[in-house]
Amino acid sequence: MERTEFPRTLSERKSLMTVSGGVMLYNSGVDWLELDLDIDWGPELTVTASVDVACWCPVNHNARVLLEARWPVTSAHDLIERFAAGTAILTEVLNTGPFEPSIWRVQAGMPDAPKATP
């Protein structure tokens, strides 16, 4: 049975269900670059693909999404199409890079990671 209407819930959570997958492309312990693909049900069913980096802004956000695509899903066919579109975006990043987080931050006009001190 196909169900795209959000189920009623007594929970105060924003989402009833989230399926999330992430791939860490670079991790130095203090700096990282990650690809994420999420399916989220709440309050609408959506598929989201994103590229995230460590955030070094004065206010510590921990991570910042630099590239994101989000699609609503209204049918099983939509779910398949949106998931394929998300994987295509992330595959393009895997095929072309860059994998160094500082390059992404500079392109986005963000502060770079602090230089490591010996």
Image (spheres, rainbow, N blue to C red):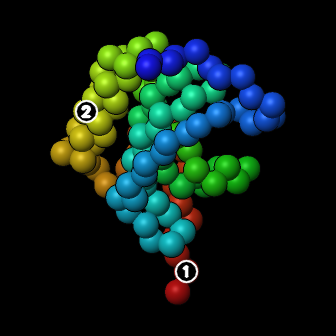
* Image location (x, y in percent) of residue 28: 45, 71
- Dot 1 or dot 2: first in sequence order is 2
* Image location (x, y in percent) of residue 48: 46, 31
Is residue 101 shown to the viewer in this render?
no
Query: Which residue is situated farthest in the bottom direction here?
Result: 118
**Residue to which mark 2 is pinned:** 88
Tell me the number on the disc at residue 117. Answer: 1
Rendered residue at 66%/33% (across/down): 15
Query: Which residue is situated farthest in the front direction here?
Result: 1
Q: Is 116 situated above or below 105?
A: below
Figure quadrant of residue 44: top right
The amino acid type found where label 1 is placed reads: Thr
* Image location (x, y in percent) of residue 32: 46, 60
**Dot 1 lies on which element?**
loop
Identify the image quadrant of the N terminus: top left
Figure quadrant of residue 100: bottom left
Of residues 1 and 27, the one drawn nearer to the viewer in this rendering? 1
Is residue 32 shown to the viewer in this render?
yes
Rendered residue at 50%/63% (across/down): 31
Rendered residue at 43%/48% (across/down): 21
Q: Is 59 situated above or below 24?
A: above
The amino acid type found where label 2 is placed reads: Ala
Q: Is 45 situated above or below 90?
A: above
Query: How far apart in space, not on screen, are marks 1 and 2 (Cα)?
Result: 39 Å
Of residues 105 and 50, the one drawn nearer to the viewer in this rendering? 50
* Image location (x, y in percent) of residue 24: 40, 59
Tell which tag, 1 or 2, sits nearer the viewer.
2
Rendered residue at 74%/28% (across/down): 9
